[in-house]
Image: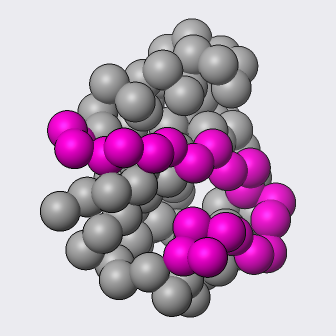
Amino acid sequence: MIEVSVIIPHYDDLAGLDRCLAALMRQTMARDRYEIIVADNMSPCGETAVRDIVAGRALVVTAAERDAGPARNVAVAHSRPGGSRREWRRCGITTSSVGR
């Protein structure tokens, strides 16, 4: 059962997104207990580039309205029911507290 939804607002930082997702993949929490949703704000690099970087590690959704707030809202709307906690992540991080 999903306990945590990790929401990543994203805008045109593919290297940072890759680092963020790599850090999340190293969590001690079992992968089936959390979901990752990347809300892309219509990055100039294009949806295909974002999906290529995500490479199945997260669900990618598109937020047409720019800014982190609207992106988070779109991602939350796509999150699975049952998650009692949501984590907001910026893509430039190298560690996360999801499994701690």
Residue 18 appears in the picture as rendered: no
Q: Position of residue 35 (x, y in %)?
A: 35, 59
- Residue at 22% x, 44% y: name it: 82
Q: Is residue 71 above or below residue 32?
A: above
- Count of marks, rendered view: 0
Residue 22 appears in the picture as rendered: yes
Of 60 and 3, nearer the camera is 3
* Helix, strand or loop for the magenta stretch, by majority: loop
- Residue at 36% x, 44% y: name it: 84
Identify the colour scheme used: one colour
Q: Position of residue 28 (x, y in %)?
A: 51, 88
- Residue at 67% x, 69% y: name it: 97
Of 92 and 89, nearer the camera is 89
Q: Is residue 37 above or below residue 18?
A: above
Q: Position of residue 57 (x, y in %)?
A: 39, 71
Picture quadrant where residue 80 is located: top left
Work out which residue is located at the far top of the displayed protein and give it.
Answer: 65
**Left or right for 41, reference 94:** left
Residue 49 covered by magenta stretch = no
Picture quadrant where residue 74 is located: top left
Q: Quadrant of the C terminus?
A: bottom right
**Left or right for 99, reference 13:** left
Of 23 and 100, nearer the camera is 100
Q: Quadrant of the N terminus?
A: bottom left
- Residue at 34% x, 78% y: name it: 31
The magenta segment is 80-100
Residue 90 covered by magenta stretch = yes
